Image (cartoon, rainbow, N blue to C red):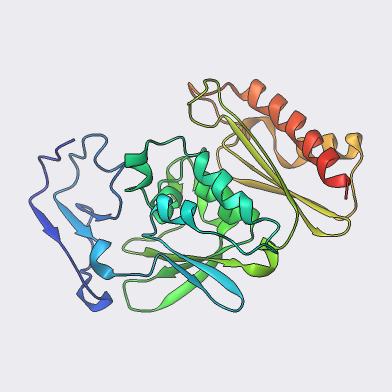
């Protein structure tokens, strides 16, 4: 879609060239959502795609994913064989249900920043205990856990003028066992419920619930739960008002499927 209110596009090539943003400005990365509907409140875009951030960087301790890394580039990454959770990367990319055009334009950071409950990059980052590195306008940086980044539907923790620079995924968590469950109301529709289970220790189960809830929820069990414990803790930590309601699923259905998936994941991961 043409954005006929845009009067100027800035293309910074370094951090020092990024201007101070006003309420009429927006950062541009993939633009798959930005150009999908009218943006009458905007008159300037700041294009980050020429910052030349490496899409993926593998260090001794982390897989660093640039905010401007395309979904296609992340999906094409081949994790080492000892990363038991390596296949989760591709599963979350495929949960986006986008065409090849979307995959080659949409960015990992954009998916997080948009804050849609169904955002699969949010699910991936949280399940793997990633950290978000954020640039402040004054030139300083800070970090927050990915689980704290999305705060509600199309809401995130970024302050005015702040930029999500990258997502750091600990390699240690990529070596843990996982189970993945996802459902949509239609074969190619947006996720209505997405639940990821991870084993971080021999008896420690962590469930990451997204798409079903207004913002991501992570439920941890210090010992392996039975069905009653599982149901009780999900009920206590995800109250009914937190389940999302839109055309992609009613709250009661989302709650029901979250419970079914949690039990299925628990059964799968209980077997060595």
Residue 136's spot in the image, x, y percent? 37, 71
- What is the quadrant of the N terminus in the image? top left
Choose between 170 and 272: the one closer to the eye.
Answer: 272
143 versus 106 height, above or below: below
Residue 63's spot in the image, x, y percent? 55, 68
80 versus 120 height, above or below: below
* Residue located 15% across and 40% down the image: 3
Residue 54's spot in the image, x, y percent? 38, 70
Can you tell which quarter of the image residue 256 is in?
A: top right
253 versus 164 height, above or below: above
Can you tell which quarter of the image residue 14 is in?
A: bottom left
| Extreme-left residue of the structure | 7
Residue 43 visible, this orientation: yes
* Residue located 47% across and 39% down the image: 96
Choose between 202 and 232: the one closer to the eye.
Answer: 202
* Residue located 22% across and 68% down the image: 20
Horizontal side of 108 relative to 205 (left or right) equals left
Horizontal side of 81 relative to 163 (left or right) equals right
35 versus 150 height, above or below: above
Residue 224's spot in the image, x, y percent? 90, 49
Horizontal side of 229 relative to 14 (left or right) equals right
Count of picture labels: 0
Residue 48 visible, this orientation: no
């Amino acid at each position: 879609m043409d954005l006929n209110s845009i009067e100027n596009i800035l293309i910074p090539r370094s951090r020092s060239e990024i201007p101070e943003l006003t309420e009429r400005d927006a950062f541009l990365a993939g633009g798959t959502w930005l150009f999908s509907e009218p943006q009458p409140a905007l008159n300037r875009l700041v294009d980050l795609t020429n910052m030349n951030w490496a899409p993926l960087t593998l260090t001794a301790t982390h897989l660093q994913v640039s905010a401007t890394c395309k979904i296609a580039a992340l999906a094409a990454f081949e994790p080492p064989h000892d990363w038991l959770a390596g296949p989760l990367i591709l599963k979350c990319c495929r949960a986006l249900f986008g065409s090849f055009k979307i995959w080659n334009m949409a960015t990992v950071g954009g998916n997080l920043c948009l804050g849609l409950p169904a955002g699969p990059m949010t699910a991936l980052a949280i399940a793997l205990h990633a950290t978000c590195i954020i640039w402040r306008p004054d030139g300083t940086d800070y970090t927050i856990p990915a689980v704290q980044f999305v705060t509600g539907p199309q809401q995130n923790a970024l302050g005015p003028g702040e930029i999500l620079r990258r997502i750091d995924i600990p390699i240690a968590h990529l070596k843990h066992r996982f189970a993945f469950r996802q459902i949509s109301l239609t074969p190619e529709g947006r996720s209505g419920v997405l639940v990821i289970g991870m084993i971080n220790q021999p008896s420690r189960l962590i469930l990451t619930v997204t798409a079903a809830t207004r913002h991501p929820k992570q439920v941890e069990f210090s010992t392996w739960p039975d069905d009653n414990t599982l149901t009780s803790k999900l009920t206590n930590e995800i109250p009914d008002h937190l389940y999302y309601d839109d055309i992609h699923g009613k709250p009661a259905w989302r709650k029901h499927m979250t419970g079914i998936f949690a039990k299925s994941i628990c059964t799968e991961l209980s077997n060595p």
